[in-house]
Amino acid sequence: MMISRPSNPVRRRSAAAATAVAITALLAALTGCGGVSGEGNSLVAGKEAFIAKCGSCHTLNRAGTKGLTGPNLDEAFQQSLKDGFGRDTVQGIVYQQILFPNRNGVMQAKIAEGDLALEIAHYVADVAAKPGKDVGALGDVGRVTQKPLATAKDGVLVMPADPGGQLLYTFKNAVSTAGPLVINTPNKSQTPHNIAIDGSGANATGKVVVGGGTSTISVTVAGGKYDFFCTVPGHREAGMEGVLTVK
Ligand code: HEC
């Protein structure tokens, strides 16, 4: 399910851009923009925080995030960048959005504050609508290696959510033998997730958990294929699903 959003982010953008220009100078002062030492570190911190705090709602290609609740941030800034607004302006817009999101909107105010908000804005502005991939230390952040297959043992299947907050389980698919099956989804990330299953005669939805909780379901499975997925809106669509094959 997609949540409705302003239909013309580009038009909103130019209004926002005007305001943002005003705080760009402030930002430059705060970040010491333009030849800061440690800029790479700040980008790494910004990317980590973006994935953990923003990626569940926003798609941003270089961050590898696939959230669908809010606007795609590559698309959101493509036009303003083409129109000649600099990336420092984009940084100002993102920073402002983090601190002062739409009051009646879905995005909570102050998900990040202070330096962290600046670092996130810095990272987003640096990579939005930029083709290719992050490299070096930045390229290592949030790299997800989804393993192909989880195997149930003694009637228990462990299907962890990505600890970094990406919309994925750490395994693509799963196998088990027929009979009673408990599926546990530990979730170390700050992004809410659960585990649910749907197939012939086995339908169950576990509770949504964050920050170290475990979502659990108990079902009885027979030979065949079952879909498992996260029911938090937008997560299954973004790829948080797989197939359990029962032999
Ligand atoms: C719970 C989902 C959610 C989270 C988490 C979230 N956002 Fe948003 N964001 C939205 C939605 C929905 C919008 C659309 C407008 C609104 O509701 O404010 C939005 C709008 C935006 C915009 C404006 C884009 C445009 O086209 O106008 C930016 C920039 C943005 N978010 C950045 C971030 C950053 C950075 C973070 C993390 C600190 C973040 N968002 C976290 C849902 C989210």
Image (cartoon, rainbow, N blue to C red):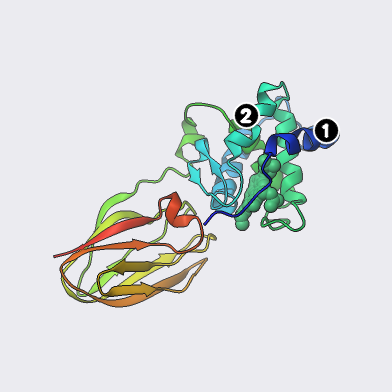
Specify the amino acid type for callout 2: Gln
**Mark number displayed over residue 172:** none
The residue that appears at 82% across and 34% down in the rendered structure is 29
Left or right: residue 223 compared with residue 66: left
Regarding residue 116, the answer to whether it shows in the image is no
Q: Count the labels in the image.
A: 2
Q: Where is residue 179, by image quadrant?
A: bottom left
| Disc 1: which residue | 18
**Mark number displayed over residue 78:** 2
Q: Nearer the viewer, residue 69 or 39?
A: 69
User: Secondary structure under badge 1?
Assistant: helix
Q: Position of residue 209 (x, y in %)?
A: 49, 69
Q: Position of residue 89 (x, y in %)?
A: 75, 31
Regarding residue 83, the answer to whether it shows in the image is yes
Left or right: residue 139 compared with residue 241: right
Measure the alpha-carbon separation of dots 2 and 1.
16 Å
The residue that appears at 49% across and 46% down in the rendered structure is 66
The residue that appears at 48% across and 41% down in the rendered structure is 64
Q: Position of residue 136 (x, y in %)?
A: 47, 31
The residue that appears at 77% across and 51% down in the rendered structure is 100
